[in-house]
Amino acid sequence: MKVSESVLFDAPGPKARRRVVVINVIGVLLALALVYYLYKVLNDAGQLTAEKWSVFGKGSIWENYLLPGLLNTLRAAAVAIVTSMLFGFIFGIGRLSTNKVVNWISSIVVEFFRAVPVLLMMIFLWIILARSGMVAPSDSPFVAVVVGLTLYNGSIVAELIRSGVFGLPKGQREAGIAIGLTRGQSLRNVEIPQALIAMLPALIGQFVVILKDSALGYIINFNELLFNAKLIGTGNANVLQGLVVAAAIFILINFALSKLASVVARRLSSRGISAGKPQDPAVPVVVADLNTKLPGGSAT
Amino acid sequence: MQGYLSLWDEYGGQMVSAFWGNLQLTFWAAIGSLVLGTILALMRISPVPSFRAFGTSYVNIFRNTPLTIIMAFGVLVLFGVFQVQFSSDFNLNFFQIAILGLTIYHSAFVCEAIRSGVNTVPLGQAEAARAIGLSFMPAARLVILPQAFRGAIAPLGNVLIALIKNTTVAVAGSVAEISGLMKTMLEFRADVGILIFLTIAVFFVIVVIPVGLLTTYLSKKLAVAR
């Protein structure tokens, strides 16, 4: 217990230590009571019986439902990660541009897609793409999920790049210009590579958001993990179990990604790189959560 | 243009009342998750190991679960399997279950926002408080927390913005709100599809951008000068 590192309390003396032990025991008992209560509720409703859970031990369930679902989730997330990086690069550089028109257009695009719920974009694309015949109706949920995720997360990546560049010391650009680079060259060859490294933890955190938001595809009939888990549930009268298994898979992957992000953040900060300056007036509020240095992504 | 105007005649009232539903979801879930999130944050910074462990597991579980699963769980399991009835009114019941789901999910983020606010308070503040003889609770109440909340305004604002947008996911919890209505409108009036999307998007832009500007303004105005 690294008590002395906390701002809130001093290293406890003997009396405080005894009090902490007592409260700790009460806390453990409360937690046990909660677990028992959940167990009792689930058991009384017959949700803990073997036949409700045993289907998840069957190879065919994994083969026909869970793995294809997980594969679709990962496929959508992987494509969306690549495309939103591209989108973010284009509009991030656009927002840093000294050309007024480019700057304005990029700002409007980024601010708009950041303010609109991803789900609205997905539902709109899903219906319109299928209706207009631009995409085969069977592909339209996948395309809608990927494009929706790209527009939103790409805008966030654009902001990450912008705030990363603002967080760099001014001397970097000045040095670039001094050796005869144009502003664009200095941006591309000097500033953005450094900004990217500083932004890496936040970027990985954004991947968690992409993976989580791919589950929105459930609402537009994209046969991803959650959708298939619900299918198992309605087929075997074990919806609760299906959702719990799907949630567990999501939590495992996202937890691993969040851990990776914090390891990267620690590595970088030990090398003296930090993600942006805390009170940078040019950095808008949505990006300010970078400065909390909390990997794991924002709430959307 | 004619088509667009007739769209307002047909759906104008419904759009406003559906969006009002989203705002109500935001309001109640914001209060709920602020309370639950503060409690969780206090647990995570407390000296008691079991409280800390509980807070940490809560955050790790719910921050990494898609909100869609939580919403689906509410309607398919809480209502479908356990017949949870907060209200005898069918629609109000789904509405309240959705508030519960939004609260559970966003509390994890509120907790982290407040904790990050505590982290902005320099160690010297606490040491100075103890040096002038304040014990744990007075030091927290008079010195640490006032600064911590001011440092947490920007991340809390982000959570609020995310919450406003995430109320659309309540459609997975069978709540009548704007994204469900948009789906219906698109199905019947595909001729003005883009305008339907832009109209509803503007509803959100009108609410989200001022909230962002306000929290940025407040976080700067109230920032502790160091």
Image (cartoon, rainbow, N blue to C red):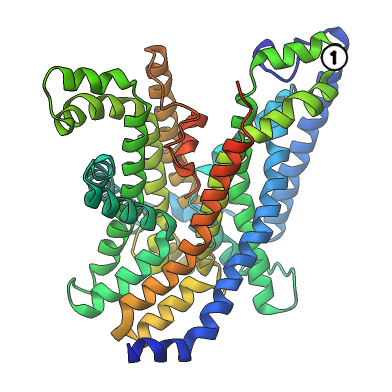
Q: Could you tell me which secondary element the residue under label 1 belongs to?
A: helix
Total label count?
Answer: 1
The residue positioned 73% from the left and 51% from the top of the image is: A40
- Inspect the image, locate mark 1, and give the three-letter code of the amino acid beneath it: Ala
- Residue A111 vertical placement versus A265 (above, below): below
Residue denoted by label 1: A16
- Residue B16 vertical placement versus A178 (above, below): below
The residue positioned 60% from the left and 20% from the top of the image is: B226
User: Going by the image, does A163 lie left or right of B85?
Assistant: left
Image coordinates of residue B146 in percent, x first then y, are: 73, 31
Quadrant location of residue B163? bottom right
Please name whichever residue, B66 or B224, is drawn nearer the observer in this view of the structure. Answer: B224
Asked if residue B98 can be seen in this view, the reply is no
Quadrant location of residue B19? bottom right
User: Going by the image, does B140 lie left or right of B114?
Assistant: right
Please name whichever residue, A227 or A206, is drawn nearer the observer in this view of the structure. Answer: A206
User: Going by the image, does A195 lie left or right of B101?
Assistant: left
